[in-house]
Structures are given as C-alpha cells and as structure tokens.
Image (tube, helix red, strand yellow):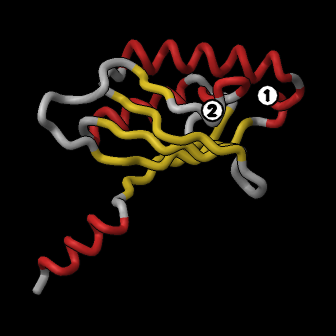
Amino acid sequence: MIFVKCGSSRGAKMRIGRSGLEGGVMADFILLTRLAPDCLRSTSGIETLEQRTVRQIEKACPGIEWKHSFALLGPYDYLDVFSAPDTETAFKVSAIMRTLGRSYSEVWVAAEWKAFKSIIESLG
C-alpha cells in the first residue's frame, strides 16, 4: 500500500504510467504503510504527501497499475495492491516510499489463490 494514495483518490482504481509490458504478465504486490504521527495531523498534509509521492512514482516506475487502496484499523494506516512489470520496479516503489520519509512501509509479493493452487499442483 502506498501512502501516495491518501486523501480523495484513496480506494479508486488508478494506473500510474503505462499499463504494463506488452504481452507480459505483471506480478502483484502488497504495500503496507504506516504514516508518521505528524503526517496525520491534517488532511492537507496527507494530500500534499500523496501528490509528491504519486509524482515520484509516475516518473521512476512506469508500468505500475494500482489495483486497490484501503484504509486500515490496526498497526498500519493503509494497504495498497499494485501490479508491477518486475521486482526491480517494486523495489523502486519501496525505495521512493522510504526516501520521502514520514512513513514506514513493507512491500510483499502476492499470488492470487488460483495461481498459487496451480503452482502447488505442478509439484506433483
């Protein structure tokens, strides 16, 4: 999940950059984000942070497709699901999140259940 998706656009489907590689299959990633307490003091601060982050990701990570964004109750503030053409691009998203500061984030690779079952079945 990305803290870039804060504010009014949260929860909307969003594409950042190109929609993916031609003929390629994009991997899904989970981004969990916890904002610094000072970031949560005003909605305008969150909105500004979101806009800065979106601009950075659009520039550095063409090909990402944002699938879902959720606000959470618990240790994290947001969970985002995005697809990326490769792991390197997902690493870039993580690095951008960390270099902009004001948040802690984790990025996990994910597989849909049907795909996971196919992998397990292929083991024999």
Q: Residue at x 65, y 32 (%)?
A: 10
Give coordinates of residue 16: x percent, y percent: 42, 22
The image quarter in which residue 86 lies: top left
Count of numbered tags: 2
Q: CA distance from mark 2 to mark 1?
A: 10 Å
Front residue of this view, candidates 57 and 22: 22
Q: Which mark is residue 68?
A: none
SS class, disc 2: helix
The image quarter in which residue 122 lies: bottom left
Residue 124 vertical position relative to residue 17 in the rendered view, above or below: below
Tell which residue pokes out farthest to the right in this image.
41
Give coordinates of residue 116: x percent, y percent: 29, 69
SS class, disc 1: helix
Residue 105 vertical position relative to residue 124 in the rendered view, above or below: above
Front residue of this view, candidates 11 and 91: 11
Foreground disc of the pair 2, 1: 2
Q: Residue at x 43, y 25 (%)?
A: 15
Q: Are marks 2 and 1 in contact (CB under 8 Å)?
A: yes
Q: Residue at x 79, y 28 (%)?
A: 39
**Left or right side of 25 for 75:** right
User: What's the amino acid at mark 1?
Assistant: Cys
Give coordinates of residue 87: x percent, y percent: 28, 42
**Left or right side of 59 for 88:** left
- What residue sits right under mark 2 in the picture? 3
User: What's the amino acid at mark 2?
Assistant: Phe
Residue 97 vertical position relative to residue 106 in the rendered view, above or below: above
Q: Earlier in the sequence, mark 2 or mark 1?
A: 2
Q: Which mark is residue 39?
A: 1
Give coordinates of residue 108: x percent, y percent: 43, 53
Q: Residues within 10 Å of mark 2 (few under 14, many from 20)?
A: many
Q: Residue at x 42, y 16 (%)?
A: 58
